[in-house]
Image (tube, grey):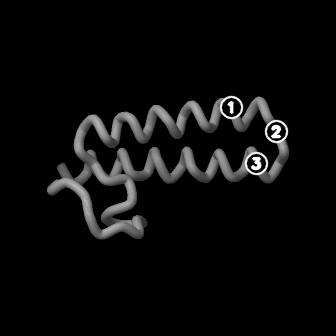
């Protein structure tokens, strides 16, 4: 699942960064959109068995075999 798993992880990383940027900008509308994107990205990751914090760029060690 290598390339697909990394694409899912990248979507989660980008969504997390957008949440942080919206918080830093104190922009409630952007924050709502970013949080929805993060929720979707995490739901997809769980649905396909990808640990979003594992692998290149991640910090976790556990998760489903990929």
Q: In this rendering, would 43 be left or right of 50?
A: right
Q: Secondary structure at mark 1?
A: helix
**Residue 64 is drawn in which quadrant?**
bottom left
Residue for badge 3: 23
Q: In this rendering, would 57 be left or right of 62?
A: right
Residue for badge 1: 32
The residue that appears at 61% across and 52% down in the rendered structure is 17
Residue for badge 2: 27
Closer to the camera in the image, 64 or 18: 64
Mark 3 is surrounded, within 10 Å at the Cα level, by few (under 14), some (14 to 19) or many (20 or more) other residues, namely some
Spatial CA distance of label 3 from label 2 is 6 Å
Q: x%, y% of residue 8?
A: 36, 45
Above or below for 16 versus 48? below
Q: Secondary structure at mark 3?
A: helix
The quarter of the rendered structure image containing the C terminus is: bottom left
Q: Earlier in the sequence, mark 1 or mark 3?
A: 3
């Amino acid at each position: 699942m290598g390339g697909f798993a990394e694409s899912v992880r990248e979507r989660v990383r980008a969504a997390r960064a957008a949440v942080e940027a919206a918080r830093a900008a104190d922009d409630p509308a952007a924050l709502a959109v970013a949080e929805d994107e993060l929720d979707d990205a995490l739901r997809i990751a769980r649905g396909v068995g990808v640990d979003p914090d594992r692998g290149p760029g991640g910090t976790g060690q556990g998760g489903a075999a990929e």
